Image (spheres, rainbow, N blue to C red):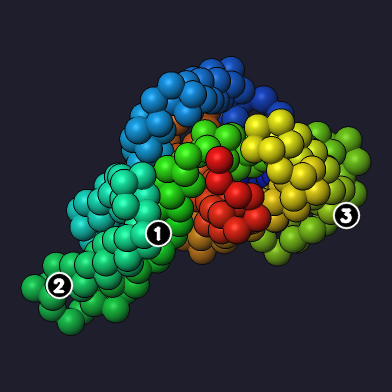
């Protein structure tokens, strides 16, 4: 979610943007890109699941490049090639292992993570001591923020009813954003996180919870065959995680002094601005659905 539009409704403060509508974005472009992405995600989930993994990996990889470039503004250089290679291995390998040898999937991801961290240290060694801590810290932040969190999306869709689980997860995140925006615009009065995102409101948060929980409850019953209260519980947790993801990304940008992480997506700012809620809610989605919703 972009830093100019919160999940709780109101536009956030920031540098003056070009004329682009009330939300501070080029709305026609934003809507078009959003529709295209939603169509690609839904089509892949319904007809070719590996396509979902490829699309998700591509977006997270683009976000990693954005974070890499943003961190360079403060003289922190991540091992981006190592991170991109590790991301592909974790996302693709995690999906394949979960489908074919689920008992080894967690071990595979831990090994990939360990090798990525090790390689990040090793490729930095030849550059010497100056900036070593800052550069390796940049790598660790990016690895933990994107490949590690994103890998849970692969685990989620690799389940036998992975399409339904992914629809519940992504749909709830979208409903959180939508419900928060509507409630924030109509009723927003009380600030929720004034030092991070001054325009976020508790009324918008309530709207996010209501619409997100309702969507998850319906999908849980109709698609996954779980009691409505289980779906609602998962939905509430996902909304909280999604808003936390938005706040985390906002703090990163504030600390780095950037308005948008990048400009890959017309009308949306950076890819990171669009997938921040998805990334941090992915492990929550996998963990809760893995233990609370029996597989098909």
Point out residue 23 in the picture as x, y percentages from the top left corner. 68, 32
Q: Please report the residue visible at 70 percent of the width from the left and 64 percent of the height from the top.
A: 195
Q: Which residue is mark 1?
A: 148
SS at badge 3? loop
Between 10 and 148, the one nearer to me in the picture? 148
Question: Mark 2 near mark 3, Cβ–Cβ under 8 Å?
Answer: no
Residue 122: image tag:
2
Compare marks 1 and 3 and give the one earlier in the sequence: 1
Q: CA distance from mark 1 to mark 2?
A: 20 Å
- Give the vertical position of 16 relative to 114 (above or below): above
| Residue 100 visible from this viewpoint | yes
Q: Which residue is mark 3?
A: 190
Point out residue 216 in the picture as x, y percentages from the top left corner. 72, 40
Is 113 on the left-hand or right-hand side of 29?
left
Other residues around mark 1 within 10 Å, as few (<14) / some (14–19) / many (≥20): many
| Residue 19 visible from this viewpoint | no
């Amino acid at each position: 979610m972009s830093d100019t539009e919160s999940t709780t409704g109101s536009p956030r403060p920031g540098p003056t943007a070009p004329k682009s509508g009330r939300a501070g974005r080029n709305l026609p472009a934003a809507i078009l890109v959003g529709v295209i992405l939603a169509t690609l995600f839904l089509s892949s989930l319904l007809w070719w699941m590996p396509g979902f993994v490829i699309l998700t990996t591509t977006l997270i990889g683009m976000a990693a490049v954005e974070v890499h470039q943003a961190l360079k503004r403060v003289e922190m250089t991540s091992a981006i090639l190592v991170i991109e290679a590790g991301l592909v291995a974790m996302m693709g390998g995690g999906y394949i292992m979960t489908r074919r040898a689920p008992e080894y999937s967690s071990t595979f991801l831990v090994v990939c993570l360990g090798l990525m961290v090790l390689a990040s240290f090793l490729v930095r060694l030849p550059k010497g001591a100056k900036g070593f801590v800052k550069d390796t810290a940049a790598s660790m932040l990016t690895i933990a923020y994107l490949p590690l969190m994103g890998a849970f999306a692969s685990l989620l869709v690799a389940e036998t009813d992975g399409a339904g689980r992914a629809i519940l997860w992504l749909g709830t995140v979208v409903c959180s954003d939508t419900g928060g925006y509507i409630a924030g615009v109509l009723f927003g009065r009380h600030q929720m996180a004034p030092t991070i995102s001054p325009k976020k409101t508790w009324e918008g948060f309530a709207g996010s919870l209501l619409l997100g929980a309702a969507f998850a409850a319906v999908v849980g019953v109709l698609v996954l065959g779980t009691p409505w209260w289980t779906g609602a519980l998962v939905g509430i947790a996902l909304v909280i995680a999604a808003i936390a993801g938005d706040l985390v990304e906002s703090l990163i940008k504030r600390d780095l002094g950037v308005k948008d992480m990048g400009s890959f997506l017309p009308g949306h700012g950076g890819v990171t601005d669009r997938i921040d809620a998805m990334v941090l809610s992915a492990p929550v989605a996998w963990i809760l659905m893995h233990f609370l919703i029996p597989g098909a």
